[in-house]
Amino acid sequence: MLAAERHAVLLDRLARDGKIIAKEIALELGLSDDSVRRDLRELAAAGLCQRVYGGALPVSPALVQYADRARVQPASKDRVAARAAQLILPGSTVILDGGTTTLAVVAALPADLACTVITHSPTIAAALVPNDRVEVFLLGGRLFKHSAVTCGAAAVEAAQAVSADLFLLGVTGVHGTHGLTTGDVEEAAMKRALAGRAADTYVLASLEKIGVASPYRVLPLAEIAGIVTDAPDDDPTVLGLRDAGVSILQAQG
Amino acid sequence: MLAAERHAVLLDRLARDGKIIAKEIALELGLSDDSVRRDLRELAAAGLCQRVYGGALPVSPALVQYADRARVQPASKDRVAARAAQLILPGSTVILDGGTTTLAVVAALPADLACTVITHSPTIAAALVPNDRVEVFLLGGRLFKHSAVTCGAAAVEAAQAVSADLFLLGVTGVHGTHGLTTGDVEEAAMKRALAGRAADTYVLASLEKIGVASPYRVLPLAEIAGIVTDAPDDDPTVLGLRDAGVSILQAQG
DNA sequence: CTTAAACGTGCAGAAACATGCACAACTCGG
DNA sequence: CCGAGTTGTGCATGTTTCTGCACGTTTAAG
């Protein structure tokens, strides 16, 4: 088992349970107690957990809640994320949007994948710390509390300085006539700016987003390269996308 | 069951019920009476509860409702953080360095404090999301995995665009002749850049950092406004700081 | 004043810990 | 393809820390 892989498991467990007991994890993963302790020591040194006698605790109680929220709807979102993760080729540069779906993409990445990730989400950045071979570039700017990503003029300007092969975009609505939409005007602008910096933009949209429109337009459907979804093939919105020349990536088993 | 976990349960119970009966809790958690008594003694020593015959009471009746904010075991680091948090005035703009000590500062902030925080640590940024009245500006750049902060040329450049009243700086060493030091050259450069953007720089240094030197110089002692520490007044390094015109903020009770 | 419960302390076994070391797997020049 | 160097893992060692028990003391209630 790779070190980075172990680190990811430990952090994941910490977020889920709110604590880690070294002995238990060691037994469960078939590792020596020493390795687990060593890992916890490293994670604590990097500020990703708090070491206590017998195990470890989250560095801040607030971070547990967010991780919990990320797993409210595992099945559909994880399937989409797993399919999207396959789009990230070794050595490529990818822009990752904020949100729970793209966070699931990080979790679905192979532990030894080497690539460059550009993101405006501190949560995504923190989640990538254990992936040793992933270079992370964080776009600065004003932090929007609502979705915990940077937006606004400074963030858009920072985005102009980067270029990528791929942009994995999360939205709250994919609609036949309204296109791709989201709930905040600043977020919409930021997503649009990011789309302009990548050769290809793929939208991640699990079933419940299809056929839905939110207040603010991000992009028209015609400007994206493809969509990753678990919606059925005969869904009218999906059919409309296909007609617009968007490639459909099915995220089923 | 971890010690820290027990402490959390005890404080939680104290906040909910307004009292703790040692015998009852011991039975309920399957612990010996001794362990519970020992824990209560420690919490009382830390000022988180008031020890009485048969159990414990809240330190002040007013705290019962939101006592869950209280942190377990205010160690050296937490005392320093609590004192440093007092430096952040309502309405001011403060730059927060990365690291566990500054993260503790975030935890020590009053929930209703309104201010602007500039940081290069995604962890700090994420931890501030619950603080509704705190405006957060994140400095972008390449993410350094070792300490989970952004560093490098892009981050330094981003720092040039901001100005603040105060910079709370974390280092790994405070030494009489070597000054303020840290373990990574890029981090040192970033900290130096941030210090240049604030009117006043205060160093946060708990006891174990005093008299220690790490490989890379951040700043000479003379260039900081003050230091927040729990080191004794008669420590030679502290005396040297005072001679250099640095104000010493004691982080004791 | 009496008594039983709660208390603090010292102690010993157990658990967790850090460190050094050896071995295996991998990397990188040659 | 090979060998030296590097890295990571697990084991053995001695150390530190925790926990429950025993015992004598203090406290509160009748």
Image (cartoon, coloured by chain):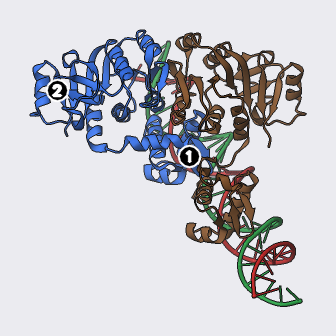
Chain colours: A blue, B brown, C green, D red
Nearest the camera: B183 or B95?
Answer: B95
Residue at horizontal 61 percent and vertical 17 percent from the top? B186
Real-space CA distance between mark 1 and mark 2, rounded to the nearest whole angstrom: 42 Å
* Whole-percent x, y for residue A115 in the image: 39, 21
Compared to residue B64, the image places residue A209 above or below, namely: above
Give the vertical position of D16 relative to B189 (above or below).
below
Q: Secondary structure at mark 2?
A: strand
| Residue B224, image quadrant | top right
Q: Are marks 1 and 2 in contact (CB under 8 Å)?
A: no
Provide the residue designation for mark 2: A248
- Whether residue A9 is visible: no
**Left-right relation of A226 to A188:** left
Residue A114 x/y as whole percent: 39, 23
Tag shown at residue A57: 1
- Amino acid at dot 2: Ile
Q: Residues within 10 Å of mark 2 (few under 14, many from 20)?
A: many
